[in-house]
């Protein structure tokens, strides 16, 4: 595959080329922390698309009209329409298709998402779930490129004085983790413990509803568990998107994670904090088919204090720091 347009996430990567989210994941992979297999379409691929499709003049014209008084939403929509109507260069398409074939090709479920280079462009990241053909992957990449011109992103760059013709939107393509059949949550280090939040299905769970764990990741790991209500979960909808459904009585009664899962997440959290030299929050997912546990995103910083309501009215609440 062409190193300028597509790079694997298990290689050393440059955040300016693959975006901050993808670069952080690649760094975790170097620390033997499991991430979903995949690749990134680079800022160079975005730039080649803009050049070959002559989109620079479209962008400049729409921005001039906005600055002359045109509605921002209309100006941004004009740019996005031009992106979606334009064809990607054959060299870029060829590298994307080849990389997807190396993951398994048509029939292999993947997620395609934006990986912005700067925080200014993270306001409305596009995400496309359970895609199963090379054509769908290519189309989603083009739409991710176009999302760089949401009204919010354009407004943010205008406020920051950033040149719209000097920005780029890398894209990440990874194997789908069937956490709709498994679970997902977060892990973050606090003092000598790692706090883990877990729920069935997709996405970051609410502290009020999730299982909560405290893990001391020493030579003899100590685990404290609190079973949450877990009344609902988010799953994939057919053919696209997500939906919320009620959990089963068994799911409400069971804990989402095993002790082995918790020890692994604690090790990963400690390793991530050490690698990035700052507290981090890991977003993880567990595949319900394979049982595989992976990290899908890493964020700087930690969450807030959580209060766990007591089960009996006469008992005080438990505070998880």
Image (spheres, grey):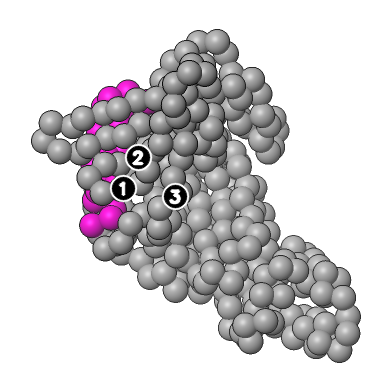
Q: Position of residue 81 (x, y in %)?
A: 79, 66
**Residue placed at 44% from the left, 15% from the top?**
254
- The answer to whether residue 295 is above or below residue 83 is above
Q: Secondary structure at mark 1?
A: strand
Q: Are marks 3 and 2 in contact (CB under 8 Å)?
A: yes
What is the CA distance from the residue labelled 3 to the residue labelled 2? 10 Å
Q: Are marks 2 and 1 in contact (CB under 8 Å)?
A: yes
| Labels 3 and 2: the sequence-earlier one | 2
Residue marked by disc 1: 189
Q: Is residue 264 magenta?
A: yes
Image-quadrant location for residue 299: bottom left
Q: Position of residue 321 (x, y in %)?
A: 37, 43
Q: Position of residue 64 (x, y in %)?
A: 80, 88
Q: Left or right? Give the position of 135 relative to 221.
A: right
Residue 274 shows in this picture: yes
Stretch in magenta: 257-274
Circle 3 Cα neighbour tier, 10 Å, few/some/many (<14 / 14–19 / ≥20): some
Q: Are marks 1 and 3 in contact (CB under 8 Å)?
A: no
């Amino acid at each position: 595959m062409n190193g300028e347009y597509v790079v694997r996430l298990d290689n050393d990567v440059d955040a300016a080329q693959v975006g901050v989210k993808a670069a952080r994941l690649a760094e975790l992979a170097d620390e033997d922390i499991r991430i979903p297999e995949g690749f990134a379409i680079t800022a160079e691929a975005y730039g080649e698309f803009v050049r070959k499709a002559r989109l620079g003049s479209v962008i400049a014209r729409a921005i001039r009209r906005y600055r002359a008084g045109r509605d921002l939403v209309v100006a941004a929509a004009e740019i996005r329409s031009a992106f979606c109507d334009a064809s990607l260069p054959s060299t870029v398409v060829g590298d994307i298709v080849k990389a997807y074939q190396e993951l398994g090709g048509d029939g292999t479920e993947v997620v395609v998402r934006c990986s912005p280079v700067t925080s200014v462009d993270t306001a409305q990241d596009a995400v496309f779930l359970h895609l199963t053909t090379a054509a769908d992957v290519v189309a989603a990449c083009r739409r991710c490129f176009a999302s760089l011109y949401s009204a919010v992103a354009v407004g943010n760059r205008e406020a920051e004085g950033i040149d719209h013709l000097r920005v780029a939107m890398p894209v990440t393509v990874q194997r789908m983790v069937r956490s709709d059949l498994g679970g997902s949550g977060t892990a973050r280090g606090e003092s000598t413990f790692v706090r883990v939040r877990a729920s069935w299905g997709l996405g970051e769970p609410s502290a009020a509803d999730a299982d909560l764990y405290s893990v001391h990741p020493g030579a003899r790991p100590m685990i404290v568990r609190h079973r949450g209500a877990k009344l609902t979960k988010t799953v994939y909808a057919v053919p696209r998107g997500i939906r919320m459904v009620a959990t089963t009585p068994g799911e409400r009664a069971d804990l989402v994670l095993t002790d082995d899962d918790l020890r692994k997440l604690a090790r990963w959290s400690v390793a991530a904090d050490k690698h990035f030299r700052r507290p981090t929050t890991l977003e993880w997912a567990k595949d319900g088919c394979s049982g595989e546990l992976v990290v899908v995103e890493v964020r700087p910083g930690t969450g807030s204090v959580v209060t766990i309501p007591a089960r009996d009215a006469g008992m005080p609440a438990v505070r998880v720091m």
